């Protein structure tokens, strides 16, 4: 573990099933979660691998599109695929998911066309899809930590509506909310944890500790491992190897089941690493060392899953097929991004107010007149 990560005492080691070398070797703390991973079939394992590879390819394509001038900004997810794919698959269809702004893999798993993310980062849309038509995947939230309050309100309402804890795991609902190590310092997040614990709302707080909040290291955010904060709020806290897709899946699946069964909320701290820049506007070489980066690349979530699958007999044709699928996925995104055309500037006035507003009408008219004052084609 690099020096920037708070060390846990030995008895509190993280839940891990797959080592960085790709060996299935459950840690002592993994026992309670093993039944969840034992239920998975080969096709589930292969789906996890496929999703990680496809989303990594999508992510690098999106970053390239930003460099081509097609997007204003891109927040890369590279390195965090296992935390996202494992937890994303752990949610059931009836669950509601509240993302931050980097959960591209979870969006894909819940059936959001990833062009919706591109449109948002390109200025073509104001960030929208209808969650009820897209796997209950709620909107990206860039205002740090706010989504934890939205999620907690939603989970409290599930409880008040009797939509959970009816002893039917196929319909009982729960909430899964994503946030970062930096967000853990935000007041909103503490308030959400207090309310969730007080009302025993059915939800899992999934903290991706990717070790950095832009240029601020996690050691600055907390003097104690983040999962241990759960104790103070009165809920279980589990640290999981976020680069291990099987462990991320099993821990989240169990805690969501517990939440659905009326056992209240839990906090997961998934230890992972943001391999890329914070966004395409950031240069991480200014604040972190190459050796730290290399130490995390050696723990790559995709490589370890590949090694494990190979050991279980996955064929070369399977891996080649996944590569082809990822390449096609990225090519399709590129083609459809370029076809979007420039965002109409007048759109910026939409949705500022719910109803038509005279000031917006005035400003929009001024902008149109200003744009029309340029002689086109010269
Ligand atoms: C309320 C608020 N304050 C500050 C910012 C600026 N900001 C954007 S991302 C970020 C860091 C977030 O770090 P973390 O929670 O660790 O998430 P990560 O980006 O690492 O996924 C900050 C401070 C913001 N978007 N919202
Ligand atoms: Mg972070």
Image: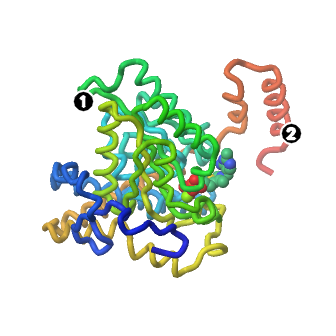
Quadrant of the snapshot with the N terminus:
bottom left
Please identify, in this view, whether the residue under mark 2 or under mark 1 is nearer the observer: 1
Q: Is residue 273 left or right of residue 245?
A: right
Q: Name the foreground residue: 258 vs 126.
A: 258
Mark 2 and mark 1: Cα distance apart in space: 60 Å
In front: 60, or 328? Answer: 60
Tell me the crowding category of disc 1: few under 14, some 14 to 19, or many 20 or more residues within 10 angstroms, Cα based: few
Q: Earlier in the sequence, mark 2 or mark 1?
A: 1
Q: Residue at x 30, y 62 (%)?
A: 324
Residue 134 visible in the snapshot: no
Say which residue label 2 marks.
Answer: 373
185 versus 5 height, above or below: above
Quadrant assignment, res 166: top left
Q: Quadrant of residue 49?
A: bottom left
Which secondary structure, mark 2?
loop
Question: Is residue 309 depicted above or below 58 in this figure?
Answer: below
Q: Is residue 160 above or below residue 90?
A: above
Circle number at residue 170 = 1
User: Badges 2 and 1: C-beta atoms under 8 Å apart?
Assistant: no
Where residue 308 sits in the image (x, y, percent)? 22, 68
Alpha-carbon neighbours of circle 2 within 10 Å: few (<14), some, or many (≥20)? few
Left or right, residue 5 beside residue 364: left
The quadrant of the picture showing ligand 2 is bottom right
| Colour option used | rainbow
């Amino acid at each position: 573990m690099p020096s920037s990560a708070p060390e846990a005492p030995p008895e509190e080691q993280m839940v891990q099933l797959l080592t960085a070398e790709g060996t299935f070797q459950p840690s002592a703390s993994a026992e309670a979660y093993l039944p969840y991973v034992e239920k998975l079939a080969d096709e589930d394992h292969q789906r996890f691998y496929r999703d990680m590879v496809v989303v990594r390819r999508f992510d690098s394509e999106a970053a390239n599109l930003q460099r081509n001038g097609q997007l204003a900004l891109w927040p890369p997810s590279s390195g965090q695929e296992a935390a996202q794919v494992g937890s994303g698959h752990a949610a059931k269809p009836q669950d509601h998911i509240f993302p931050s702004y980097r959960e591209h893999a979870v969006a894909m798993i819940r059936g959001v066309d990833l062009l919706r993310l591109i449109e948002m980062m390109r200025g073509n849309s104001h960030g929208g899809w209808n969650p009820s038509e897209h796997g209950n995947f709620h909107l990206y939230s860039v205002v740090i930590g706010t989504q934890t309050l939205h999620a907690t309100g939603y989970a409290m309402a599930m409880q008040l509506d009797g939509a959970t804890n009816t002893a039917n795991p196929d319909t009982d609902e729960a909430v899964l909310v994503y946030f970062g190590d930096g967000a853990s310092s935000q007041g909103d997040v503490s308030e959400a944890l207090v309310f969730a614990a007080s009302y025993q709302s059915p939800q899992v707080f999934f903290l991706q500790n990717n070790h950095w909040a832009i240029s601020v290291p996690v050691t600055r955010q907390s003097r104690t491992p983040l999962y241990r904060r759960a104790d103070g709020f009165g809920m279980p806290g589990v640290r999981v190897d976020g680069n291990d897709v099987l462990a991320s899946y099993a821990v989240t699946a169990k805690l969501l089941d517990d939440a659905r069964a009326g056992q209240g909320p839990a906090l997961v701290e998934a230890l992972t690493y943001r391999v890329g820049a914070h966004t395409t506007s950031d240069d991480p070489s200014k604040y972190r060392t190459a050796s730290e980066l290399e130490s995390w690349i050696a723990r790559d979530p995709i490589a370890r899953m590949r090694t494990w699958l190979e050991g279980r007999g996955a064929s070369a044709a399977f891996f080649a097929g996944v590569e082809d699928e990822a390449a096609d996925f990225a090519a399709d995104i590129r083609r459809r991004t370029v076809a979007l055309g420039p965002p109409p500037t007048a759109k910026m006035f939409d949705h500022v107010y719910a109803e038509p507003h005279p000031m917006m009408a005035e400003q929009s008219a001024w902008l149109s007149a200003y744009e029309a004052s340029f002689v086109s084609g010269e």
